[in-house]
């Protein structure tokens, strides 16, 4: 390879990178749009540990969208609002909820998404993962092309001289 070969090689790599980036963005957006919301419940939660991981969090590509209600499971009426949650399905309870954990078991309703087996959203996730894995190789391909160009320049510069006695 020579320096003249750099221009098309760089353009090709940039074009492939842009197509991969846009393709991954489109696939992830499309995935989010076709994945249906699912209503979930988990009952009789003891909040004494300070946090709870929802049982549905073990599902493939689980994403907790919202916690709809946290109510007292015992006969005492009451709702609780002092908590935070992550997309991974971990609910962290507030100090007041943890303090009353011996008295109050909680019923939680929530909304989430996940990739069901044999579904369109799982197929899109698998495709996006494959493309992302291929994109990881772009840096290695760039290094190999750069090394080939450097070696090509070095070898051609030594090959031009003729030995004269």
Image: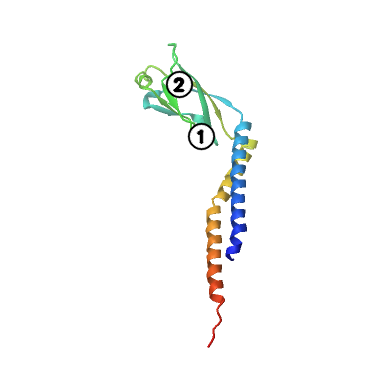
Visual colour scheme: rainbow
Q: Residue at x 61, y 29 (%)?
A: 36
Farthest-out residue, bottom: 165
Whether 73 is drawn above or below 131: the answer is above
In the rendering, at what x and y percent does residue 120 appear?
Answer: 65, 36
Q: Residue at x 35, y 22 (%)?
A: 95
In the rendering, at what x and y percent does residue 2 appear?
Answer: 58, 66
Residue at image mark 2: 44
Sequence-earlier tag: 2 or 1: 2
Q: Work out whether residue 165 or residue 153 is closer to the camera in this orientation and state it.
A: 165
Residue 123: quarter of image: top right
Asked which secondary structure carries label 1, the reply is helix
Q: Work out whether residue 38 or residue 9 is closer to the camera in this orientation and state it.
A: 9
Residue 97 in sight here: yes
Q: Residue at x 37, y 24 (%)?
A: 48
Tell me: 157 left or right of 121.
left
| Foreground tag (2 vs 1) | 1
Say which mark, if any, is on residue 116.
none
Residue 137 in sight here: no
Position of the N terminus, as image quadrant, is bottom right
Residue 52: quarter of image: top left
Residue count near mark 2 (Cα–Cα under 10 Å), binned few <14, some 14–19, many ≥20: some
In the rendering, at what x and y percent does residue 83 appear?
Answer: 42, 23
Residue at image mark 1: 58
Asked which secondary structure carries label 2, the reply is strand
Q: Residue at x 59, y 38 (%)?
A: 28
Residue count near mark 1 (Cα–Cα under 10 Å), binned few <14, some 14–19, many ≥20: few
Q: Work out whether residue 101 or residue 61 is closer to the camera in this orientation and state it.
A: 61
In the rendering, at what x and y percent does residue 84 appear?
Answer: 43, 25
Separation of residues labelled 2 and 1 (CA atoms): 19 Å
């Amino acid at each position: 390879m020579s320096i003249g070969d750099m221009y098309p090689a760089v353009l090709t790599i940039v074009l492939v990178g842009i197509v991969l980036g846009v393709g991954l963005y489109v696939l992830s957006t499309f995935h989010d749009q076709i994945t249906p919301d699912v209503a979930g419940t988990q009952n009789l939660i003891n909040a004494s540990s300070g946090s709870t991981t929802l049982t549905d969090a073990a599902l493939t590509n689980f994403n907790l969208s919202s916690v709809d209600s946290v109510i007292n499971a015992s006969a005492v009426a009451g709702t609780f609002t002092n908590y935070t949650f992550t997309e991974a399905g971990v609910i962290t309870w507030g100090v007041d909820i943890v303090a009353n954990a011996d008295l109050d078991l909680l019923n939680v309703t929530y909304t989430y998404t996940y990739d069901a087996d044999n579904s369109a959203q799982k197929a899109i996730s698998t495709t996006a993962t494959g493309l992302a894995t291929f994109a990881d190789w772009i840096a290695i391909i760039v290094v190999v092309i750069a090394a080939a160009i450097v070696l090509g320049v070095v070898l051609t510069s030594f090959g031009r001289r003729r030995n004269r006695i």
